[in-house]
Amino acid sequence: MLDVIIIGAGVSGCACARELARRKASILVLEKEEDVCCGTSKANSAIVHAGYDAPHGSLMARLNVQGSRMMPALAKELDFAYRRCGSLVVCLDEADRPALQALYQNGVANGVEGLRIVERAELQAMEPNVADEAVAALWAPTGAIVCPFGLTFALAENAAANGVRFQFDTAVTGVAAIDGGWRVQTAAGAYEARCVVNAAGVYADTVHNWVRGDDPLTIVPRRGEYFLLDHAAGDHVRHTVFQLPGRLGKGVLVTPTVHGNLLVGPTAQDIGGKDDTATTAAGLDELRAKAGLAVKDIPLRQTITSFAGLRAHEPRHEFFIGEIAPGFVDCAAIESPGLSSAPAIGVMVADIVARSLALPENPAFTPTRKGILDPKTLPPAERAALIRQNPAYGQIVCRCESVTEGEIVDAIRRTPGARSLDGVKRRTRAGMGRCQAGFCSPRVMEILARELGVPLAAVTKAGGDSHIITGVNKDVY
């Protein structure tokens, strides 16, 4: 019998796994998709919220502020992209000043450092492209941006390096109490553990209700649609710019990304399907209409892709974290600011599990991890020396993002490593650029097939049945 099974390999599940690896325990992460970071964690605003928005006194507020404070040190330990650019909540109407002041006061009560209200002249100096109607803004210097893929992969790799096992393509179909623990049923068979952590994202209510049907949880998938703009638009704003909800409704954010793009979104639509991440004409039209309210002249013609993600919304708008039955811990309803809160969520869940199982500390735990080497970041002499040592770092595969074969090979050989085009894309950005994988896909497929030892036709876009080709012409004719 295992000590701990974690259901779900999103950012929350991986944060829990990494923190639990600090204890002496046998830990298994079960994930229904083919990789980590395949649900909400892969499609969001990539914002580390300062913590002024969550209701004062809520668990959401406490973990948001704690997680935001932990993020800079964690980025150094685990070597993922993070930048503290600060955020602005723009007020577009003098009549809405009381709401801006209330947001400031809530942030101060939550313990957010450095908050202040900036007036029109200072705001325009900070953000030259702010809307002409803007009258003031709430400035939060601790607001930041992060690579959500990089954060999740870093947590997973560090957990794996410290003994945590990951099993993919393994959907959980049931959970039942047994003597001394729990039996987790999957399509691949049953697993038993002394403790189970439910970090199943939009499906966390289903898992919860198997155990506590007398106290049900309901999660409503809330779809958010986005535009991602080219690097050429990346400096249109310097900070994350939010719109203060007012007479025109709740707006959308405009933010730079850590990779130099510009992100606009999201919408917010409650839907029925827990796997429905399709973009819609209505959603994208809403984005176009709202995007320019707080920031003017957004070059939406430079959009290179649109996408949608699902938030695990619970009508009470609160995180549900706790031991709901002996040895069964919920980590449920983790919607925004879940990404910002993830480091703190991991600590909280690990503490609950460690107390429940009386787990001792793991003196061999290693807290650091080195990310995938990007030759572009090296001085010319060091880059030349690297290429002489390993010529694969001189072979550009993705022209838009200048990703080399060496980086792709590294991404595949890691644990857990890339097994699909999307797995490579999220780890290295090969296929993330202007042409959206139109040029590099065939070469990435060849590298995947070679490194994984599979036929080219077995390579998928995102696991499962998402095959790219059915065969090779020369083998047929």
Image (spheres, grey):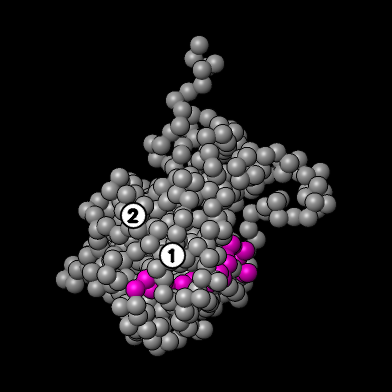
Number of residues whose C-alpha sits closer than 10 Å to that of mark 2, classed few (under 14), some (14–19) or many (20 or more): few
Would you say residue 256 sits in the magenta stretch?
A: no
User: Which of 133 and 64 lies nearest the eye of the viewer?
Assistant: 133
Number of residues whose C-alpha sits closer than 10 Å to that of mark 1, classed few (under 14), some (14–19) or many (20 or more): some
Q: Which residue is drawn at 24% across and 54% down?
A: 271
User: Which of 245 and 267 lies nearest the eye of the viewer?
Assistant: 245
> Under tag 1, what secondary structure?
loop
Residue 289: mark: 2
Q: In this picture, is 52 found above or below 18?
A: below
Residue 262: x percent and y percent? 50, 55
Q: Residue at x 81, y 43 (%)?
A: 388
Q: Name the residue under label 1.
A: 131
Indicate the amino acid at tag 2.
Answer: Ala
User: Which of 195 and 472 lies nearest the eye of the viewer?
Assistant: 472
Q: Is residue 342 visible?
A: no
Would you say residue 92 sits in the magenta stretch?
A: yes
Residue 355: x percent and y percent? 42, 81
> Under tag 2, what secondary structure?
helix
Q: In which quarter of the image is residue 339?
A: bottom left
Quarter of the image with the N terminus in it: bottom left
**In the displayed structure, does residue 220 sit left or right of residue 197?**
left
Farthest-out residue, top: 477
Q: Can residue 109 be seen in this view?
A: yes
Q: Residue at x 16, y 71 (%)?
A: 214
Query: First in sequence: mark 1 or mark 2?
Result: 1
Q: Residue at x 67, y 39 (%)?
A: 396
Magenta part of the chain = 76-93
Residue 257: x percent and y percent? 53, 59
